[in-house]
C-alpha cells in the first residue's frame, strides 16, 4: 500500500533523511520511533507531500506520488494527517472541522458522514461545540475524525498523543487502535514512546540520524535488533563486552554464552552482547554474585540495578515480592532465549 | 484575483476623475502659489475668456521634479513659483521656454524678468526689517549688513535658513559683498539672534511683539496679512510694528518675485502666454496688492492704502538670475555659520 | 527536482519578487544613488550640519520613544488589567489621537499657546513656546503613543494569569510583577508598536520644519532643494533608510521571540479599583486624550465655527470625497498586497518570497516627499515608455496614464503604508500553527481554499486593523497628494496644510477638523476590532481551557 524507495531529503545541503525504504501493507498500522531529530516527522511530511524528496520515490497503491519525475500535491494525495498540536480550525465548530475535507459533497451526505464519525470517535452530539470548549482528549478525537472523514488511503499520525497526559494517552491510543482496526485503515504513526509503538503497531521502524535502521514486527525489533543502536534504544537493555570463544560461543563476565554470532567475527574477536532486564533472574542458586546498587519499585515488578564484581552494571526486572535491600548481595543466573551479539567496532 | 480587481477599479476611478476635461480650450498651470492666492485670479481669467484653467499646486521643488520626470509628456503649460531661485533652477533644467511678448516686456521691468523671456515676475515681495518702535530707534537701522553689528546682540529674530527667502537674501549679499564678507556677516547675525530660528515670518513678528526680540527680518506681505487679520489680537500685533526699508542709501532693499514661465513641452503655449499677459495686467497686479499685500512689478500701478503706509522704497536692481546662481553657495555659508 | 510543483512555485516566487521590487522601486531609485559615489557636498555636510541632524534625529527618536512607551504601555496596562470609572470609554478614547496628523497638532498647539491664543488669554499667564526639540517630542508623543497602546494592550489582555500567579508565589509585589513578568512578556508587541512610532518620527517633515528642528528629514529637503544636490539628499535618505532597516530588523527579532515566549493559561481577571483610587487614575489616563485630541479638536472647532457653512460647500464635499476615495483605495490595495506577500511567504518561504515580504516595508522608512518624488520618477518613466511604445505602434498616446492620475497618489500611499499590513498580517499568520495549513492541505484544499476557509477567517482581526490603520494614515498623509495629485484635485490634508503653512490657521481649521472627524470613524471601528476575541475568533488551536476542563 505505502512504498518508500531510497527516499532522501536534504535541507540546505544537510542530510535530513538518507535512503529510507519501507513497505506498509493495506490495513496495517506502522509506527516510527527514534530520538528527537532523527527525521521521523520529516518522513511523515514527505509522505503527506509537505516536503519534496531530494531523491527516491513515494508510492501509494503503486501510484508514484513523489519522485521519478512525478509530483502529486498534498491536497490530491488523499493522505490524512493528525498533528501533534492537534491543529483543529479554531474558527469552525466540531462538525465543520470534520466536514472540512468533505467539500464538494452534497450537504446531506456531509452531515451523515459527520454523524458517523462523531459516533465512531465517541463524541455524539458534540458537533456544535467549538474546539476551545473541548478537553484535550476530545480535541484529539475530533482531529482523528476530521482526518478520517474523506476516507484517506493512508492516515499519518505525528506524535498524536504527546500533548495528552499519561493516563489519557493510554486510553486514547487504545481507542484509536480500535477505530483504525475496525475501519481497516492503513496508518503510520510517529512517536518517541516505544511502549505506545509496541501497543499500536503491526510494524515498527527505528530511526536514527536520518536512517531507518530496522523495519520489522515489534517482536523482532525487540528480540532481534538488527543494529546496535536499535538494541540500545529499545527495551532498556545494556551491551556488555565479551570475546568470541569458539563457534557460536561468547565468553562474558556472566560466563560463556551460546547462540548465533554475526557473520565474519573471528575467534577471539571482541564483541558486545545485548542483555535485557528480563534476561537476568535473581536466583539463590545462581552461579554469579552481584550487589544491589539501586532499586525502583514498579508495582508488579521491581527494577534492580546490579553490579558484578568487575564493576559491570546490569538491569534486572524481578517480581516485586523479592525485596532485596540496596547494598545487599544476590545470586543471579541468565535466562537467555537467544543471543544478540554485535561485533565491536 | 480580487486584488487585481481592486487595483483595476482604483485605476479606472482615477482615470474617470482625471479625464473629466473634454477637448476644449484649456491651459494647465503648475503653481507654487497656494491655491487661495491664485485660484480667484484664474477663475476670473476663465470668466473673461472661456478658457478652462487646470491647476495643480504644490511646492515649487516638487513641481519642478515632476515636470522633469514627465518630460515631453508633461501637461504643464505654465510654471508659477513664489521666488526667482526656483524659476532659475527650472530654466537650468530646460523646463522653461523662451517667450517673446510685447505686452510682457512692456509690463515687466527688465530686472524682474529673465533676459530671454524664460520667466517673468508677476509680483514683488520686499524683505524688510520690522521693528518695535518703542524699543528701536530707526535712526540706528541702516543696512542688512549692519544687522551683524554688536548693538543688535540678542535682539534679532529671523526664520530658519531652510527658507528660500533667507537663502535669496544671503545670495544677494554674496553677489554684492563677496563670499568671505557674507560669511563673516552670517556669523555675526547668528550671534545676534535672540533665539534659535523657529516658525515662519509671522512668528518672528509675534516674537517682536512679545518682547523676545526687538526686530525681525520678514517679507512685507506677512505683516500686511497680520494687519488685515480677522481677529483683533493679531491685528493689534501687526499695527504695533513699524517697517524699515534697508540699504536705501545704497543699492536698495532686497526684493524677490513671484513669477512664471512657459513650459518647454507646453501643449498649449499660446494660451500660456495669454494667461501670463493676464497675470501681469493692471487688474491682476492690483489684486496681488489687495489680497496678499504684494507690490506690483510695474511701478505706477496704483497700490493699496496699506502698501502706501509702509512708504516708498528703492529696490535692489540685482538681476534675479543671480539669486538662483548663488543659492547653493548661500546655503553653505549659512550651514557654516550655524544658522539653523 | 520533481517537475510541476517546485517549477511553478519558483516562477511565482520570482513574480512576487518582481511585484515587491515594483513597489519598492520609488525608494530604491532614491536610495540607489549611493552607487554613484559620495557627493562632492558630502564633506561640507559632514563638517557643518550632519552632526546636528544626527544628534537631533536621535534626540527626537529617543524622547518620542520614551514618551510613547510611558504613556502607551502605562495606559495599556491600566486598561487591560484594571477596572475604574469610565473604563469603557477610555478604552477607545485613548486611540483618538491616532486621527490627528502630527503637523496639524503642532500648528494647533502653537496657536493655542500663542500670546494671542485662547489659553494664554484665558489663564492670563505666560505660556512657554513649544516650538523646539522638546515641543516636537511632545507633539509626536501625543499623536503616536496610540500605536504602542494598541499593540501593548492586546498583549496584556492576552497574558495568562499563570505567570502572574507564579510570580506571586515567589513573593513578587505588584510593581515587581509588572516590571519582571507582565512587561517582558508583552515586550515583543511593545517593540512592534515602538518601531512604528520611531519610523514615523524619523520620517516626519511637517512638524520639525515648522518647529525649526533640523533633522535628517529636513536635511534631505534642504540639501536637495537648497543646495540643489539631489545626490547628497538621496544619500542622506540612504542614511535614514539604514536606520529604518535596523529598526525593522529589531522588530522582526522581537516577533520571533514572541513565538517562543508566552505562557499558556486563562487570562488574568482584571482588578476592580475602588472609586477613591479609580477616579485619580482615570483622570490621569484622560490627559493624553485631552492634550492629543480633545483640546486641539476644540480649538479647531472654535476657529472653524465662523466658517461652518463651508462644510456644505460643494468644493469642500469634493475635497472630502477625494480624500475618502484615496484612503479607501489605498487601504484596500495595501491590505490586499500585504496579505499576498506574507501569505505567499507562508506557503513557501524561499529566498525570493522572503525578500519580497521584507522589501515591502521600505516605503515607511523615507520621508513622504522623497518617496513621492521617487514615485514621480518611476511612474513617469513607465508612462514615457508606454507612450513611446504606443506611438511606435502607430496608436494614439494615452498621456500620463499613471503619473498624471490619482493612481499615482494611491500607488505612493500604498508603497508608503504597505509595511502596516505586512507587519500586522505577518504577526497574525505567525500566531497560527503551521499544522493548520498542513491539515487543510491534507484534507484536499488547494492554496486558494486554504486562504479562503482557514487564513482569511482567522486573520479577520489583523486584516481589519491593518486596513483601518492604513485608511487613517492615508487620510493624514500629505506629501504624496501634494506632489502627485492630478489637475484640479485636492485633499483635506493638502488644503489644511497649504493654509496652515501660510499661517492661516483659522482658515485651515475646517479641513483639519474634517480630517480629524473622518479619522475618528475608522479609529472607533478599530476599537471594536480589538475587543476581546469572541468564540468565533480564538487564535490558538489549543485553547487555554484544556488544562482545566479535562475529565480525569
Image (cartoon, coloured by chain):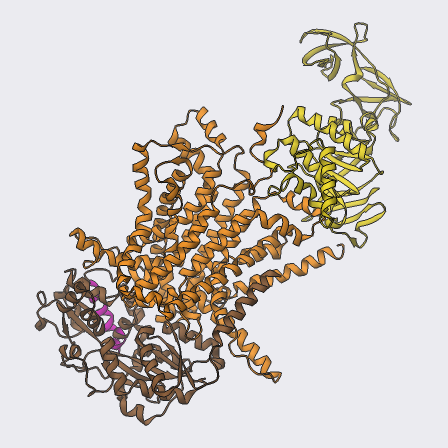
Chain colours: A yellow, B brown, C orange
| Residue C193 left/right relative to C53 | right
Instruction: Tell me where residue C345 appears, x and y as whole percent.
Output: 61, 53
Instruction: Tell me where residue C388 appears, x and y as whole percent.
Output: 57, 80
Q: Quadrant of residue C317?
A: bottom left
| Residue A245 left/right relative to A313 | right
Quadrant position of the N terminus of chain A in the picture: top right
Give me the residue at 8% from left, 65% from top. Answer: B134
Residue nearest the observer in this picture, C490 or B97: C490
Per the image, is B180 magenta? yes
Q: Main secondary structure of the magenta part?
A: helix
Residue at the bottom extreme, as displayed:
B102
Instruction: Tell me where residue A134 appears, x and y as whole percent.
Output: 61, 33
Q: In the image, is residue B290 above or below residue C211? A: below
Q: Can you see residue C208?
A: yes
Instruction: Tell me where residue B108 appears, x and y as whole percent.
Output: 27, 88
Q: Can you see residue C34?
A: no
Residue nearest the observer in this picture, C496 or A54: C496
Q: In the image, is residue C319 above or below residue B325? A: above
| Residue C57 left/right relative to C10 | left
Q: Quadrant of residue B286?
A: bottom left
Quadrant position of the C terminus of chain A in the picture: top right
Q: Which residues are magenta?
A: B170-191
Amino acid at each position: 500500500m505505502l512504498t518508500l524507495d531510497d527516499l532522501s531529503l536534504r535541507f540546505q545541503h544537510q542530510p535530513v533523511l538518507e535512503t529510507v525504504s519501507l513497505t506498509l501493507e493495506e490495513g496495517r498500522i506502522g509506527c516510527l520511533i527514534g530520538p528527537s531529530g532523527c527525521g521521523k516527522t520529516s518522513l511523515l511530511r514527505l509522505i503527506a507531500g509537505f516536503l519534496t524528496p531530494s531523491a527516491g520515490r513515494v508510492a501509494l497503491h503503486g501510484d508514484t506520488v513523489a519522485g521519478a519525475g512525478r509530483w502529486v500535491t498534498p491536497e490530491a494525495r488523499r493522505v490524512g494527517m493528525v498533528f501533534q498540536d492537534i491543529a483543529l480550525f479554531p474558527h469552525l465548530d466540531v462538525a465543520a472541522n470534520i466536514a472540512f475535507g468533505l467539500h464538494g459533497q452534497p450537504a446531506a451526505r456531509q452531515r451523515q458522514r459527520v454523524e458517523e464519525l462523531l459516533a465512531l470517535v465517541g463524541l455524539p452530539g458534540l458537533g456544535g461545540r467549538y474546539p476551545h470548549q473541548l478537553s484535550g482528549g476530545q480535541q484529539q478525537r475530533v482531529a482523528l475524525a476530521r482526518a478520517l472523514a474523506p476516507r484517506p488511503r493512508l492516515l499519518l499520525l505525528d506524535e498524536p498523543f504527546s500533548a495528552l497526559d499519561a493516563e489519557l494517552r493510554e486510553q486514547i491510543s487504545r481507542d484509536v487502535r480500535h477505530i483504525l482496526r475496525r475501519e481497516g485503515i492503513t496508518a503510520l504513526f510517529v512517536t518517541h514512546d516505544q511502549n505506545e509503538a509496541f501497543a499500536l503497531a503491526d510494524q515498527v521502524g527505528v530511526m536514527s540520524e536520518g536512517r531507518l535502521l530496522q523495519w520489522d514486527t515489534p517482536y523482532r525489533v525487540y528480540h532481534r535488533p538488527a543494529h546496535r543502536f536499535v538494541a540500545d534504544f529499545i527495551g532498556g537493555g545494556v551491551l556488555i563486552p565479551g570475546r568470541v570463544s569458539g563457534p557460536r560461543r561468547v565468553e562474558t563476565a556472566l560466563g560463556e554464552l551460546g547462540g548465533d554470532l554475526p557473520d565474519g567475527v573471528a575467534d577471539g574477536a571482541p564483541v558486545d552482547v545485548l542483555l535485557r532486564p528480563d534476561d537476568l533472574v535473581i536466583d539463590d542458586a545462581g552461579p554469579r554474585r552481584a550487589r544491589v546498587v539501586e532499586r525502583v519499585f514498579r508495582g508488579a515488578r521491581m527494577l534492580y540495578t546490579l553490579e558484578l564484581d568487575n564493576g559491570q552494571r546490569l538491569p534486572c526486572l524481578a517480581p516485586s515480592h523479592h525485596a532485596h535491600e540496596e547494598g545487599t548481595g544476590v545470586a543471579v543466573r541468565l535466562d537467555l532465549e537467544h543471543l544478540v551479539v554485535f561485533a565491536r567496532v | 484575483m480580487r486584488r487585481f480587481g481592486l487595483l483595476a477599479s482604483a485605476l479606472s476611478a482615477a482615470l474617470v476623475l482625471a479625464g473629466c476635461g473634454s477637448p476644449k480650450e484649456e491651459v494647465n498651470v503648475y503653481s507654487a502659489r497656494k491655491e487661495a492666492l491664485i485660484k480667484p485670479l484664474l477663475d476670473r481669467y476663465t470668466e473673461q475668456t472661456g478658457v478652462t484653467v487646470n491647476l495643480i499646486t504644490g511646492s515649487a521643488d516638487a513641481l519642478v521634479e515632476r515636470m522633469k520626470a514627465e518630460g515631453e509628456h508633461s501637461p504643464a503649460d505654465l510654471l508659477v513659483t513664489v521666488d526667482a531661485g526656483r524659476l532659475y533652477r527650472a530654466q537650468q533644467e530646460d523646463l522653461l521656454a523662451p517667450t517673446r511678448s510685447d505686452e510682457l516686456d512692456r509690463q515687466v521691468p527688465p530686472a524682474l524678468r529673465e533676459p530671454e523671456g524664460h520667466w517673468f515676475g508677476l509680483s514683488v515681495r520686499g524683505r524688510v526689517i520690522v521693528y518695535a518702535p518703542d524699543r528701536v530707534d530707526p535712526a540706528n537701522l541702516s543696512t542688512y549688513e549692519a544687522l551683524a553689528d554688536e548693538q543688535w546682540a540678542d535682539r534679532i529674530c529671523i526664520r530658519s535658513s531652510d527658507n528660500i527667502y533667507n537663502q535669496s537674501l544671503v545670495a544677494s549679499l554674496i553677489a554684492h559683498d563677496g563670499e568671505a564678507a557674507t560669511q563673516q556677516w552670517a556669523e555675526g547675525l547668528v550671534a545676534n539672534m535672540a533665539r534659535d530660528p523657529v516658525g515662519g515670518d509671522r512668528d518672528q513678528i509675534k516674537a517682536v511683539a512679545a518682547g523676545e526680540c526687538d526686530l525681525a527680518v520678514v517679507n512685507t506681505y506677512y505683516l500686511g496679512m497680520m494687519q488685515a487679520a480677522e481677529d483683533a489680537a493679531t491685528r493689534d500685533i501687526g499695527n504695533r510694528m513699524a517697517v524699515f526699508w534697508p540699504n536705501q542709501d545704497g543699492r536698495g532693499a532686497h526684493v524677490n518675485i513671484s513669477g512664471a514661465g512657459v513650459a518647454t513641452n507646453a501643449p498649449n503655449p499660446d494660451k500660456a502666454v495669454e494667461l501670463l499677459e493676464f497675470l501681469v495686467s493692471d487688474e491682476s497686479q492690483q489684486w496681488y496688492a489687495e489680497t496678499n499685500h504684494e507690490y506690483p512689478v510695474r511701478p505706477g500701478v496704483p497700490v493699496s492704502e496699506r502698501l502706501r503706509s509702509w512708504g516708498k522704497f528703492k529696490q535692489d536692481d540685482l538681476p534675479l538670475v543671480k539669486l538662483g546662481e548663488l543659492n547653493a553657495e548661500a546655503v553653505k555659508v549659512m550651514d557654516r555659520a550655524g544658522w539653523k | 527536482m520533481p517537475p510541476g510543483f517546485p517549477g511553478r512555485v519558483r516562477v511565482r516566487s520570482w513574480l512576487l519578487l518582481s511585484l515587491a521590487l515594483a513597489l519598492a522601486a520609488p525608494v530604491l531609485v532614491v536610495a540607489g544613488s549611493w552607487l554613484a559615489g559620495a557627493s562632492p557636498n558630502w564633506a561640507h555636510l559632514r563638517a557643518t550640519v550632519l552632526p546636528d541632524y544626527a544628534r537631533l534625529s536621535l534626540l527626537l527618536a529617543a524622547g518620542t520613544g520614551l514618551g510613547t512607551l510611558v504613556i502607551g504601555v502605562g495606559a495599556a496596562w491600566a486598561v487591560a488589567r484594571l477596572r475604574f470609572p469610565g473604563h469603557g470609554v477610555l478604552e477607545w478614547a485613548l486611540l483618538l489621537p491616532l486621527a490627528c496628523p502630527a503637523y496639524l497638532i503642532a500648528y494647533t498647539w502653537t496657536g493655542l499657546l500663542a500670546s494671542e491664543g485662547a489659553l494664554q488669554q484665558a489663564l492670563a499667564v505666560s505660556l512657554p513656546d513649544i516650538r523646539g526639540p522638546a515641543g516636537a517630542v511632545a507633539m509626536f508623543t501625543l499623536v503616536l503613543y496610540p500605536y504602542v497602546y494598541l499593540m501593548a494592550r492586546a498583549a496584556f489582555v492576552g497574558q495568562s494569569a499563570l505567570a502572574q500567579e507564579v510570580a506571586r508565589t515567589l513573593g513578587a509585589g505588584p510593581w515587581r510583577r509588572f516590571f519582571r513578568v507582565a512587561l517582558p512578556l508583552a515586550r515583543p508587541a511593545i517593540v512592534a508598536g515602538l518601531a512604528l512610532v520611531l519610523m514615523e518620527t524619523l520620517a516626519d517633515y511637517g512638524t520639525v520644519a515648522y518647529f525649526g528642528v533640523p533633522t535628517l528629514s529636513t536635511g534631505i529637503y534642504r540639501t536637495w532643494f537648497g543646495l540643489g544636490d539631489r545626490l547628497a539628499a538621496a544619500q542622506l535618505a540612504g542614511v535614514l533608510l539604514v536606520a529604518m532597516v535596523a529598526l525593522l530588523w529589531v522588530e522582526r527579532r522581537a516577533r520571533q521571540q514572541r513565538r517562543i515566549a508566552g505562557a499558556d493559561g486563562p487570562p488574568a481577571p482584571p482588578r476592580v479599583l475602588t472609586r477613591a483610587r479609580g477616579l485619580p487614575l482615570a483622570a490621569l489616563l484622560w490627559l493624553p486624550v485631552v492634550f492629543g485630541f480633545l483640546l486641539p479638536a476644540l480649538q479647531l472647532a472654535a476657529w472653524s465655527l465662523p466658517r461652518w457653512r463651508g462644510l456644505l460647500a460643494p468644493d469642500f464635499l469634493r475635497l472630502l470625497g477625494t480624500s475618502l476615495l484615496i484612503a479607501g483605495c489605498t487601504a484596500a490595495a495595501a491590505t490586499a498586497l500585504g496579505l499576498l506577500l506574507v501569505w505567499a511567504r507562508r506557503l513557501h518561504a524561499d529566498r525570493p518570497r522572503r525578500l519580497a515580504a521584507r522589501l515591502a516595508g521600505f516605503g515607511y522608512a523615507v520621508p513622504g516627499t522623497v518617496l513621492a518624488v521617487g514615485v514621480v520618477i518611476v511612474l513617469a518613466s513607465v508612462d514615457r515608455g508606454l507612450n513611446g511604445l504606443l506611438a511606435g505602434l502607430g496608436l494614439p498616446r494615452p498621456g500620463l496614464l499613471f503619473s498624471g492620475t490619482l493612481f499615482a497618489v494611491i500607488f505612493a500611499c500604498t508603497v508608503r503604508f504597505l509595511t502596516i499590513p505586512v507587519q500586522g498580517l505577518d504577526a497574525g499568520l505567525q500566531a497560527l500553527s503551521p499544522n493548520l495549513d498542513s491539515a487543510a492541505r491534507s484534507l484536499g484544499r488547494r492554496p486558494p481554499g486554504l486562504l479562503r476557509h482557514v487564513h482569511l477567517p482567522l486573520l479577520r482581526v489583523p486584516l481589519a486593523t491593518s486596513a483601518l490603520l492604513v485608511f487613517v494614515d492615508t487620510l493624514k498623509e500629505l506629501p504624496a497628494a501634494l506632489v502627485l495629485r492630478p489637475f484640479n484635485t485636492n485633499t483635506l490634508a493638502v488644503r489644511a496644510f497649504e493654509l496652515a503653512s501660510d499661517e492661516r490657521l483659522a482658515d485651515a481649521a475646517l479641513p483639519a477638523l474634517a480630517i480629524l472627524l473622518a479619522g475618528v470613524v475608522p479609529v472607533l471601528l478599530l476599537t471594536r476590532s480589538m475587543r476581546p476575541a469572541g468564540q468565533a475568533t480564538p487564535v490558538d488551536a489549543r485553547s487555554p481551557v484544556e488544562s482545566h476542563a479535562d475529565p480525569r
